[in-house]
Image (cartoon, rainbow, N blue to C red):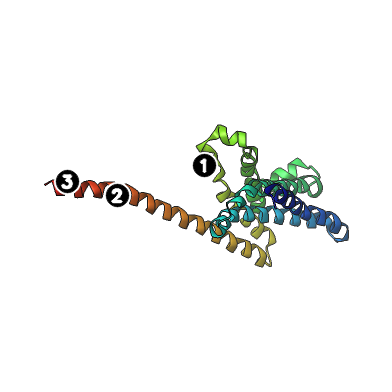
Amino acid sequence: MSIKTLKIIVFIICLYPLARMGFLVMREVDPIAFLLHSTGRWALTGLLITLSISPLRQYTGRAELLRFRRMLGLYAFFYAVLHFCIYLGLDRQLDLSTIGKDIIKRPYITVGFTALMLLIPLAVTSTDNMMRKLKRNWARLHRLVYLIAPLGVLHFYWLVKRDVTVPVIYGVLLTVLLLWRVARWYKRRRAAEGVMKAPSSAKAVESANRA
């Protein structure tokens, strides 16, 4: 199966939660709360799936997995924006005064809003053109995802209040993904230090032989 066909399949799968929400929302006693919870959860799920692409690529040896990372990240952003728009339009009915007070006084909303604001530059710079323009700064900017994802989990945890089982599961999964990256960074650093020491050792042996 070609990469193009797989991308179409992944695209449709990413739209499935939205179609499911549209089908189930009228059955809910509190449809606004259902939509808020569903969109927020899928935004966070999208972030975790996006972060899992690199480990999966390493352990499976399938480099083509990286081609889906941008799409998955943009879908995470899409559901995050939808989550915020439902909060603005349906939950708070565009009452800017109330929204401003919520962002300032309610920690879980402050954290969630901060995560969304940090996601915006990542989405805007996700194109190949922006990658070429920013060069090394592109990778530095997109490391913000390592801050955004924990903020998203914290937002979810504070929002739930009572049964925190699901947010804790998200937190554990995120911790594993971040620890994998720390381990990989440490391994690369040790390898780089080894490369730097090797020439020095060779020079020392050569000097000793000459002496």
For mark 2, does the 10 Å Cα neighbourhood hold few (<14), some (14 to 19), or many (20 or more) residues?
few
Q: Decide if residue 43 is on the left or right side of residue 200.
A: right
* Disc on the earlier residue, 2 or 3: 2
On residue 197, which mark appears?
Answer: 2
Q: Which residue is mark 3?
A: 207
Kindly report the distance in space between the C-alpha atoms of the residues bearing marks 3 and 1.
41 Å
Pick the residue in front: 8 or 173. Answer: 8
Sequence-first disc among 3 and 1: 1
Per the rendering, the mark at residue 140 is 1
| Residue type for callout 3 | Ser
Say the numbered circle drawn on residue 211.
none
Q: Label 1, label 2: how many angstroms apart (C-alpha)?
A: 27 Å
User: In the image, residue 137 lies at what x, y percent?
Assistant: 52, 37
Q: Amino acid at mark 1?
A: Arg
**Residue beneath the point at 24% across and 50% down:** 201
| 15 to the left or right of 63 | right
The image shows residue 183 at horizontal and vertical percentages of 46, 58
Which of pointers 1 and 2 lies earlier in the amino acid sequence?
A: 1
Inter-mark Cα distance, 2 to 3: 15 Å
Relative horizontal placement of residue 180, taking residue 156 as reference (left or right): left
Q: Mark 3: which secondary structure?
A: helix
